[in-house]
Image (tube, helix red, strand yellow):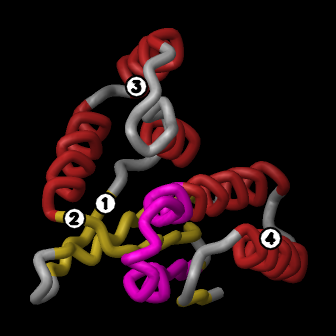
Amino acid sequence: MYYKGDITDNAISLIIEQMETCLDQEQAPTRVRKKIIYMIIECLQNIYNYFKDKPYQKVLNDESCLDIKNDAYSYTINASNYITDESSQNIIKKIEYINSLSTEELHEFYLKVLSSQQVSSSGGAGLGLIDIARKSGTKLSYVLAPNTNGDIYFTLQISILNN
């Protein structure tokens, strides 16, 4: 499944509905389906929240992309959107820290962030990437592609094993 364009409430609903239909047709295990849907929602909400108060970046939001592929072993979700260089550096630090943690350490970190009740400038508590890593059971990957305006086209790559 592939989607490129403006991420709105309606687009999120449509994408989820289409993905559920695809997963039904593929007869994906219920546990895997729930993980995939959760991670798609989390990724789309992150993109939506990043752009919701930035109408001057409408053109950049039109370049947001969600690509979901599967093979015999896993599903791969690629969620892409433009972010500032500063934001990309912050996300990279978070991802690298999250990837450095063991399963137990990741769970402890999740509980620590959950109990801190601090809200970020984007309106969240910062649990999204942590929870994605916890639920996927795999390391998070990313790709950065700078553009001429100084923005970065950021792609978060998530793998979900088919077991």
Residue type of the residue flagged with mark 4: Ser
Query: Which sits earlier in the primary sequence, circle 3 or circle 1?
Result: 3
In the displayed structure, 33 sits above or below 57; it is: above
Mark 1 nearby-residue class (10 Å; few <14, some 14–19, many ≥20): some
Query: Which sits earlier in the primary sequence, circle 4 or circle 1?
Result: 4
Foreground label between 2 and 3: 2
Q: For residue 53: magenta?
A: yes
Circle 3 — which element? helix
Picture coordinates of residue 77, whole percent (x, y): 52, 70
Q: Are marks 3 and 1 in contact (CB under 8 Å)?
A: no
- CA distance separating discs 2 and 3: 27 Å
Picture coordinates of residue 108, whole percent (x, y): 43, 14
Residue type of the residue flagged with mark 2: Thr
Q: Circle 2 sits on which residue?
A: 84
Q: What mark, if any, has residue 13 been given in the picture?
A: 4
Q: Quadrant of residue 54?
A: bottom left
- In the image, 41 versus 132, the foreground residue is 41
Q: Circle 3 sits on which residue?
A: 106
- CA distance separating discs 4 and 2: 27 Å
Q: Are marks 1 and 2 in contact (CB under 8 Å)?
A: no
